[in-house]
Image: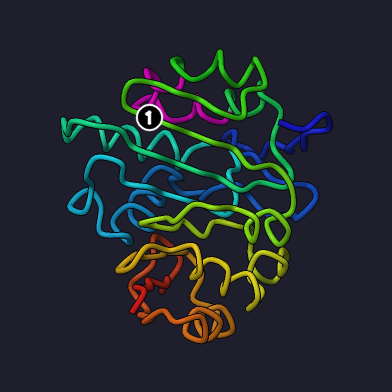
């Protein structure tokens, strides 16, 4: 992680908010339910899981998506290893991440297992069933240099209106270039310019029902 992590503000109920982007890190209603609906189900998981399945995400945030994905992987009892790569320009401090994750008791076991790694400043974590890597820095610079291919993308930057850098057409093109054949992407936003950027990158894009107050979200499959 970096030497100057972002310090969130905390709303009533303990939801962390980024002062840099004036946007909450996850749904004010239920962050875990939003992650499961948007990123897991939106990418056809757990049905597509297999040994070595590779998730990549733009925006690591509190680490909630990682915890939820690993929880689902373990609940399936599948053999092998889940791979997760996350691109994050402004990582949270370890104690803030741990505080945010504590809001989800269902994930408490995994959160406790990973907490020592965050406190140690780890950018890579290797467990018997997980290979995780944090790629710090601006994704517009780091993703083009990445040599991996993702089976599923969690596009989880802050709101496109407040964090347009993570939704630029050039970056969506890099997402497509780093997606395995038949791979997918999902995001909570249904903004027209985001859908058009994904389509221009080669994805078949669908507008799907969103979580909670969000009427729509976006699901994409690489043609």
Q: Is residue 18 above or below residue 97?
A: below
> Which of the 4 image quarters holds residue 78?
top left
Tell me which secondary structure the magenta stretch mostly adopts: helix
Residue at screen point 66% across, 64% down: 166
Residue 15 is left or right of residue 180, and the answer is right
Which of the colour schemes (rainbow, by chain, secondary structure, one colour) is used?
A: rainbow
Q: Is residue 64 above or below residue 187?
A: above
Residue at screen point 38% across, 57% down: 152
Of all residues shown, which one is farthest toward the front? Answer: 147
Residue 109 or residue 181, whichever sits in front: 181
Q: Is residue 173 above or below residue 139?
A: below
Residue 23 is left or right of residue 201, and the answer is right
Residue 211 part of the magenta segment: no
Residue at screen point 20% across, 32% down: 75
Residue identifier under label 1: 130
Of all residues shown, which one is farthest toward the right? Answer: 4
Give how far across and how far down residue 11 sits, in percent.
66, 40
Give how far across and how far down residue 20 sits, in percent.
80, 50
Residues rendered magenta in the picture: 100-111
């Amino acid at each position: 992680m970096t030497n100057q992590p972002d310090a969130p503000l905390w709303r009533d109920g303990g939801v962390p908010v980024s002062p840099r982007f004036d946007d909450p890190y996850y749904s004010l209603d239920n962050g875990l339910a939003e992650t499961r609906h948007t990123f897991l189900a939106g990418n056809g998981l757990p049905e597509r899981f297999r040994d070595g399945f590779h998730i990549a995400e733009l925006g690591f945030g509190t680490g909630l998506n990682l915890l939820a994905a690993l929880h689902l992987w373990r609940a399936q009892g599948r053999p092998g290893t889940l791979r997760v790569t996350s691109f994050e320009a402004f990582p949270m401090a370890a104690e803030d991440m741990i505080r945010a994750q504590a809001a989800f008791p269902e994930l408490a076991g995994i959160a406790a297992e990973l907490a020592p790694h965050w406190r140690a400043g780890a950018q890579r974590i290797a467990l018997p069933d997980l290979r995780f890597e944090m790629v710090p820095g601006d994704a517009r610079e780091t993703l083009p240099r990445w040599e991996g291919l993702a089976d599923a993308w969690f596009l989880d930057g802050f709101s496109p209106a407040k964090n347009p850098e993570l939704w630029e057409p050039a970056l969506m093109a890099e997402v497509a270039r780093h997606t395995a054949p038949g791979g997918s992407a999902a995001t909570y936003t249904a903004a027209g310019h985001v859908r058009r950027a994904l389509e221009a990158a080669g994805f078949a894009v669908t507008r799907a029902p969103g979580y909670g107050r969000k009427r729509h979200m976006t699901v994409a499959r690489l043609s």
